[in-house]
Image (cartoon, rainbow, N blue to C red):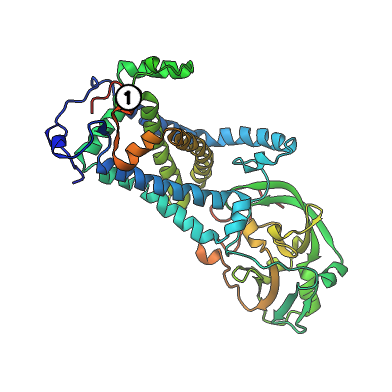
Amino acid sequence: MHLRLDAPARSTEVRRFGQATRWVHRTTAGLMGVCVVTAAFLYIPQFAELVGRRELVVRIHEWAGLALPVPVLAGLASRLFRADLGFLNRFGPHDRVWLRAAVRRDKRRSSRPAGKFNAGQKIYAAWIAGATLVMLGTGLIMWFTHLTPLQWRTSATFVHDWLALTIGIVLAGHIGMALGDPEARRGMRTGTVSQDWAEREHKLWRP
Amino acid sequence: MFDEWVNDEQPEEPRGKPIGRRVLLGTLGLGALGVVTAPTLQRGLESFLAGASDKDPTGLTGLLPNGGGFRYYSVTSSVPRKNATTYRLTVDGMVDRPGSYTLADLRALPQTRMVRDVQCVTGWRVPGTPFEGVRLSRLLDAAGVREGAGAVRFTCFDGAYSESLTLDQARRSDVLVALRMQDKDLGHAHGGPVRLYVAPMYFYKSAKWLSGITVTKDVKPGYWEERGYDVDAWVGRSNGRDDAPTT
């Protein structure tokens, strides 16, 4: 890490996320937030009564949903972001240990070995990416009603509704865990984390 | 383009298996499977949730997809409230005797009660919902529809919504100017104090917050119809849907 020496960085800080990854996370989170809030306005009667303007809310929901994959696709231009995706994709033997401990609710650090991302984060990332694409596909079927036969539309609505509920719950878990770990949030916000935190939470990660 | 520092180290973790990709593709596959099996799943869930919502004092099951109950749709940001003193229903256009009704006037007319399913074009259906009110045909007869008239246009005090029926459709005995729903006076959220109720058609035809009935020569498409919905909105025979008819 020759370049790090030039910077006035404190020795206890380590670089966790590059600008691209943070930018992708922030814009994706923003768009997902718009989707969730507009969905609530469309779906939950009390919120719908509060807001009304159904046509406008539908338009915002549709365009935010359509834009949701764009930050990740744009981020692919960055080598560091691609490297992060690689870390998320690849599961080593330690991830199996981590998952087994999670199932047994074993919270000891020694039984939760993790690289740059722990196995839970990897599963979450892969699942939310797949779920987003399913929402996009079913959403497009609902949006462009003339493209598919009616039965497809009804089925797409069914999947869209139930998956929306599931995503809402999983997303709440994701945000809840982030709220419980300020240092992890700092990593995503500023790009750096303390050496102590990195060694404690991501022992196998070599920044 | 976003790279801000050079990381010349090798990845710390052994390359491992691409399980993330498999989870992603598996999720996609499950989604597709969900679409294919939706009709079966939906039938099962609907009957289960309908049973559960009967025994659910919290009403939370109503928020679940297909959990039953009505959804609130308004096209404007806020809708003024009208009560017995401020509400008026005007009847005008191609009629001999234009006029207006207060809520008390409407209540004094003979009331018709009907129990039918409500079917929304977005898919939800509320079975066996009682509506009660004055037959639209009665108000049209009282006003005296003139020769050459062919349609009826409805306007609403939300300031934006509108609907239309042909004169023949409007004269059907299952089209009401409804004052009560589910054996209660119509509340604001359900379009009260007075809404249209067009039993055989998708529920967007049943305009909420009804304030004006205008007899016209031709059908003028309403709010959603200008946005792509069918004007002749028979349940099961329009909007590309095949729901069971409600009448």
Whole-percent x, y for residue B206 in the image: 67, 61
Residue A15 versus residue B229 in the image, above or below? above
In this view, the residue in front, A56 or B36, is: A56
Q: Which of B169 and A112 is in front in this view?
A: A112
Q: Residue furthest left?
A: A2
- The crowd level at tag 1 (other Cα within 10 Å; few <14, some 14-19, many 20+) is some
Res. A141 in view: no
Residue A120 x, y percent position in the rendering: 40, 26
Chain designation of label 1: A
Q: How many marks?
A: 1
Question: Residue A179: percent from the left, percent from the top?
Answer: 45, 36
Q: Nearer the viewer, residue A16 or B58?
A: A16
Q: Is residue B47 above or below residue B240?
A: above
Question: What residue is shown at x 71% (from left), y 39% (from top)?
Answer: B58
The residue under label 1 is which amino acid type?
A: His
Identified at 69% across, 82% down, the residue is B94
Residue A187 as seen in the image, left or right of residue A143: left
Check disc 1 and report its element: helix, strand or loop. Answer: loop
According to the image, label 1 marks what residue?
A202
Q: Residue shown at 62%/34% (left/top)?
A: B45
Rendered location of residue B46, percent (x, y): 64, 37
Q: In this view, does B111 lie above or below A113?
A: below
In the rendered view, does B23 fall on the left or right side of B241? left
Image quarter for residue B175?
bottom right
Asked if residue B80 shows in the view, the reply is yes
Please say if A54 is above or below B162: above
Check the image and name the residue furthest to the bottom.
B96
